[in-house]
Amino acid sequence: MVDTKLVEETAAKIRTMEVRGALKIAVEASKAMLHVIEEGASFEEMVQAADKLKDARPTAVSLPNAVNYILHLAEESSTLEPSVAKATLIANTSNFIEELSSSIDKIAEIGANLIEDGDVLLTICNSKTVTSIMVKAKKDGKNFKVYACETRPRMQGHITVKELTDAGVDVTLIVDSAAYYTMTHKGVKKVFVGADTVYANGDVINKIGTSQVALAAKNAGIEFIVCTESIKLSPGSMIGETVEIEERDPTEVTDLKGVKVFNPAFDITTKEYISKIITEHGVIPPETVYNLLKEKFAWSIGD
Ligand code: RUB
């Protein structure tokens, strides 16, 4: 029996959102998989670990994509001589984690090119991908302003404000319901948001409130830009599968007793509201997500 403590701990941290954000979830789950592989797990035990991790949160497809890819690597290496199989799998999994972790830096480089001196930007939630782009643009010497929606009920906007402030970016916190007014009265030029899942048809799932911001941006004639690593593309959507939109505990919204609460954690922004998608492979229109999916997930979907 392999030691699955790290798997349990990682799954718990993802569930309680101590580890959050779609890329970070995928990276930490992959590290837990690497640990059980190093411990000498059988394929069966790897599948069990993968299932525990995948069950932790339902909406970000980066999580199943990452652990399923590691299982795919395990299947591939199982055809090798037993003496080299484990070392090969460890090396391939480590490379994958390295690539996953560095994909954000490539997006930061590309995304920073889209920020111009004097820009006024708006974002919602805390996407490390989005803040990395803004931090890179600042390092490149650009001066711009950011409005950050506080993002009820978990207030991830506060994390965004801290990250950007620490990097010297001019950032202002707003309540979520001030998004449209801020767009139209503070000269917002572009909205940057992250993604948890991107469907083959170009629709994007991200933090609750994102689709309202997209509607407001469209009405105000403002560019709406999604920033996503390709690990968040959904291969299942090519065969019509959808992800579950997570509903979280009512206590996140209110401590009032006897009140009915609906607390969805994510929503879907359809592609007609999305101006462009920034990936580590370049800037693409939402209509071409299908092509990138086919290329990146050939291991999962076949030909
Ligand atoms: C986080 C969220 C983020 C995406 C992208 O939701 O919706 O915008 O996950 O983040 P939660 P990143 O706080 O519920 O996890 O770019 O860091 O992967």
Image: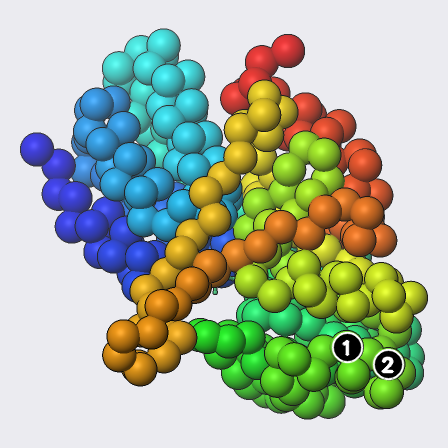
Please tell me whether residue 299 is drawn above or below residue 166 in the rendered image: above
The local crowd at label 1, few if under 14, some if 14 to 19, many if 20 or more residues have their Cα within 10 Å, is some
Residue drawn at 80 percent across, 53 percent down = 273
Residue behind mark 1: 180
SS of the residue under disc 2:
helix
Q: Is residue 156 left or right of residue 118?
A: left
Is the C-beta of the residue carrying label 2 under 8 Å from the nearest atom of ligand 1? Answer: no
Residue 208 in which image quadrant: bottom right
In the rendered image, which quarter contains the C terminus?
Answer: top right
Residue 82 lies, in percent from the top left, at 26, 15
Res 184 label = 2
In the rendered image, which quarter contains the N terminus?
Answer: top left
SS of the residue under disc 1:
helix
**Label 2 to label 1: alpha-carbon separation:** 6 Å
The local crowd at label 2, few if under 14, some if 14 to 19, many if 20 or more residues have their Cα within 10 Å, is some
Q: How is the image coloured?
A: rainbow
Q: Amino acid at mark 2?
A: Thr
Residue 12 lies, in percent from the top left, at 25, 57
Asked whether the beta carbons under mark 2 and mark 1 sit within 8 Å of each other, the answer is yes
Q: Is residue 95 left or right of residue 267?
A: left
Q: Amino acid at mark 1?
A: Tyr
The front one of 230 and 260 is 260
